[in-house]
Amino acid sequence: MAGIAEVARRAGVSPATASRALTGRGYVAAETRRRVQEAAAELGYAASSSATSLVTGRTSTVGVVMPTLSRWFFAEVLEGIQDSLLQHRYDLALYGGPTGSRGRQEMFDYFLARKRFDGLIAVGIEPSAHELERLAASARPMVSVGGYDIGTDAVSIDDAAAGRIATEHVLGLGHRDVVFLGGDPDGKRTSFGDALRVDGYRDAMRSAGLEASIRHVRSTATMPGGYAGASELLADRRTRPTALVCVCDEVAVGAIIAARRLGVRVPADLSVIGIDDHTNAEMFSLTTLRQRPREQGRTAVELLMRRLQDPDAPVRRVREASPLVVRNSTAARDVAASAVVADAGG
């Protein structure tokens, strides 16, 4: 296979110029770049990452750190990151492990400390272990995806606003007994962004004069977690709410399944709203707030490329829109039906 020196000879330039023309790093006149690219194509040249690294001082590799791939959000973000990195001809090195696990600790202590990356993208990192701070201390360009950041480039939705808007939607339908399902306020089993969604719910309830009615039922942010939490919550007709605001769509789907098994009609007896617009949301006709994690992944890469090109560029925090998508899992509160339930419970 031809090397960079042969490409340079055919194009009539130095090896360094040929490398710059093929990697896109550094100025090369347009006509020179065209000659080099044509020479490379004629010779079937494919640049090796090690050779490019010697010339540019870069590895063409981006490290991605995230806690899990088992949840829809993280898998979608990774898809977006990978798609965009391929377009920029960058390699991806993925590091994952549950928050607080030994493997994750070793990942930060050894692997991330010694590996060479041009930059890092940190997805869903929690504040409790100060991991973003440790990543930033490496002095590599970094972008965070999710609610928590430390003043670096970042992308997310406005999680607190999402929780507030979801709650205001069911309040606007006449519901007053509204419970937030999912998420753990101590931050040990849920993400920072999920906790912000709980805060948004609380703010909306207070603004509606319903502070005394605030209820938060904890569950893991999964479909089984939503099912378990809703099964217990909905079993007693005397304390059953008329609406659930769920921390994410996976919890909302679990809650809908629990309601069906208990004979609670959605939305006639119970309105359910989620946050995410998960791939299964349409199948369950779930009212939700849409976020686009693939786009967040792509945006994170663009922010990182911008930072690599201009290390002194102003810091950017991009907040993706999360519009309300109304389907059939929410409806106006049936006051007459509620009165009948109250009489029967008496």
Image (cartoon, rainbow, N blue to C red):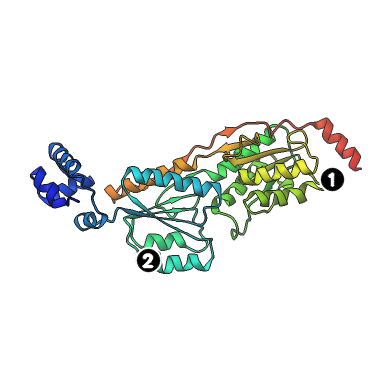
Q: Quadrant of residue 27?
A: top left
Secondary structure beneath dot 1 equals loop
| Lower position in the chain sequence, tag 2 or tag 1 | 2
Residue at 24%, 54% in the rendered image: 48
Question: For the image shown, how many numbered marks are present on the structure?
Answer: 2
| Numbered badge on residue 178 | none
* Residue 310 in view of the camera: no
Q: Amino acid at mark 1?
A: Arg
Judge whether 186 appears above or below 163 on screen. Answer: below
Residue 225: x %, y % from top left: 67, 52
Mark 2: few/some/many CA within 10 Å (<14, 14-19, 20+): few
* Residue 5 in view of the camera: yes
Residue 98: x %, y % from top left: 53, 60
Residue 78: x %, y % from top left: 45, 48
| Numbered badge on residue 238 | 1
Relative horizontal placement of residue 225, taking residue 314 as reference (left or right): right
Residue 292: x %, y % from top left: 50, 39
Query: Quick one: 34 or 77, which is closer to the camera?
Result: 34
Residue position marked by numbered label 2 in the rendering: 113
Q: Amino acid at mark 2?
A: Ala
Mark 1: few/some/many CA within 10 Å (<14, 14-19, 20+): few
Secondary structure beneath dot 2 equals helix
